[in-house]
C-alpha cells in the first residue's frame, strides 16, 4: 500500500477524515472528497473502489455502496471507519472466473489494508485493532441464512467479543439493496441471530450456576439415597465450580469423596 504525495501530514489527514465521518450525514462530505481529489490524500484506497463496470460482469458500484453504508451508521468513529473500510479489499480481490465477478477473502485482505492505513494516519492502537477486527468479521454473517448450529452462533459472538454490538450494527447497515423484501429478510435474520445469542447466553449462565455433578450422580457415586445431605453436597460442588471452574471428572469425584469423608456423619 502506497500513499501518494500530499501536502497534509498524517495528523491533518486524520482530523480531516474524522471531521467528515462524524458529520450527522457524511454523504456529501465523502462525495466532495472523492470529486475534489481530497479522498486520494486522506484514504487513497477509497477512490479505487470506483471499479470499472462492464455489461457482462455486473456488480454494484462499490464506492457508492460504501458511502451509503457509512451514512447509514450512527456517528461513532469506530463504526464509521469500519463502514468506510469494510469493502476496501474488493479491488485487490476481484476475479472474473466462472463467468461472474467474485471478491473472495476480501474481508481478510481488507483488514490488513485497514490496519496499515489507520496506523499510517496515527490512530491509537485500540481503535486500529477494533476497526480492523470489524472489517475482518464483516462478512461472517453471510452464511447465517444457510443455517447455523448453536456452536456456530456462540463462536460468532465469542469472536466478536466486545465488538458484537458494533458488528451487528455494521451488518444491518451493510444492506443497501433496493429490493425491499430482500432488505427486510436480512433484518429479520439479524433479529433472529441476536435473539439466539441472548438465549444461548442465558442458557450458558444458567449452566455455569449448576454444579458439575447432578443429584443422581452424587447419590450413585456415594452410594446413598436422597435427603438434605445431597443438597449440601451439591452446594459444595457448586462452590468448587465457582472457585476452580470445571475440573476433570476424576478430580471432581475425588473432591466429593473428601467432602463426604468429613460430612457423612451428618447423613446418619
Image: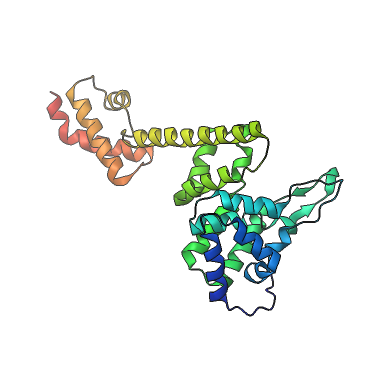
Comparing 84 with 201, the one in front is 84
State the residue at coordinates (74%, 58%).
50
User: Does residue 27 lie above or below 38 as drawn?
Assistant: above
Q: Indicate the quadrant containing the C terminus: top left, top right, bottom left or bottom right.
A: top left
Q: Is residue 226 left or right of residue 169?
A: left
The image position of residue 239, as x and y in percent, is 25, 40
- Image x and y of residue 69, in percent: 60, 50
Q: Nearer the viewer, residue 214 or 268?
A: 214
Pick whichever, 112 or 35, lies toward us: 35
- Give the residue displayed 77% in from the left and 54% down from the top: 94
Display colour scheme: rainbow
Q: For this rendering, which residue is in front, 236 or 242?
A: 242
Q: Is residue 112 left or right of residue 58?
A: left
* Residue 150 visible in the snapshot: no
Quarter of the image that includes the N terminus: bottom right
Name which quarter of the figure residue 215 lies in. Answer: top left
Q: Position of residue 33 (x, y in %)?
A: 65, 65
Picture quadrant where residue 237 is located: top left
Image point (56%, 56%), residue name: 82
Amino acid at each position: 500500500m502506497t500513499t501518494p504525495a500530499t501536502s497534509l501530514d498524517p495528523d491533518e489527514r486524520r482530523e480531516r477524515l474524522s471531521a467528515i465521518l462524524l458529520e450527522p450525514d457524511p454523504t456529501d462530505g465523502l462525495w466532495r472528497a472523492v470529486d475534489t481529489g481530497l479522498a486520494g490524500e486522506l484514504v487513497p484506497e477509497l477512490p479505487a473502489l470506483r471499479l470499472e463496470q462492464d455489461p457482462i460482469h455486473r456488480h454494484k458500484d462499490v464506492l457508492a455502496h460504501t458511502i451509503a453504508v457509512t451514512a447509514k451508521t450512527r456517528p461513532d468513529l469506530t463504526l464509521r471507519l469500519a463502514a468506510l473500510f469494510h469493502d476496501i479489499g474488493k479491488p485487490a480481490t476481484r476475479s472474473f472466473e466462472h463467468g461472474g465477478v467474485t471478491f473472495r477473502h476480501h474481508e481478510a485482505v481488507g483488514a490488513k489494508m485497514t490496519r496499515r492505513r489507520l496506523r499510517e494516519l496515527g490512530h491509537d492502537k485500540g481503535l486500529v485493532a477494533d476497526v480492523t477486527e470489524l472489517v475482518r468479521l464483516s462478512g461472517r454473517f453471510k452464511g447465517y441464512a444457510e443455517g447455523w448450529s448453536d456452536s456456530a452462533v456462540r463462536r460468532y459472538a465469542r469472536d466478536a467479543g466486545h465488538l458484537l454490538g458494533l458488528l451487528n450494527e455494521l451488518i444491518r447497515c451493510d444492506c443497501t439493496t433496493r429490493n425491499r423484501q430482500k432488505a427486510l429478510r436480512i433484518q429479520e435474520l439479524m433479529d433472529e441471530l441476536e435473539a439466539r445469542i441472548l438465549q444461548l447466553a442465558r442458557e450458558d449462565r444458567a449452566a455455569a450456576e449448576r454444579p458439575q455433578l447432578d443429584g443422581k450422580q452424587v447419590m450413585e457415586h456415594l452410594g446413598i439415597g436422597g435427603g438434605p445431605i445431597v443438597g449440601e453436597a451439591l452446594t459444595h460442588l457448586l462452590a468448587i465450580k465457582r472457585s476452580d471452574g470445571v475440573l476433570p471428572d476424576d478430580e471432581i469425584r475425588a473432591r466429593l469423596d473428601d467432602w463426604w469423608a468429613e460430612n457423612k456423619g451428618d447423613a446418619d
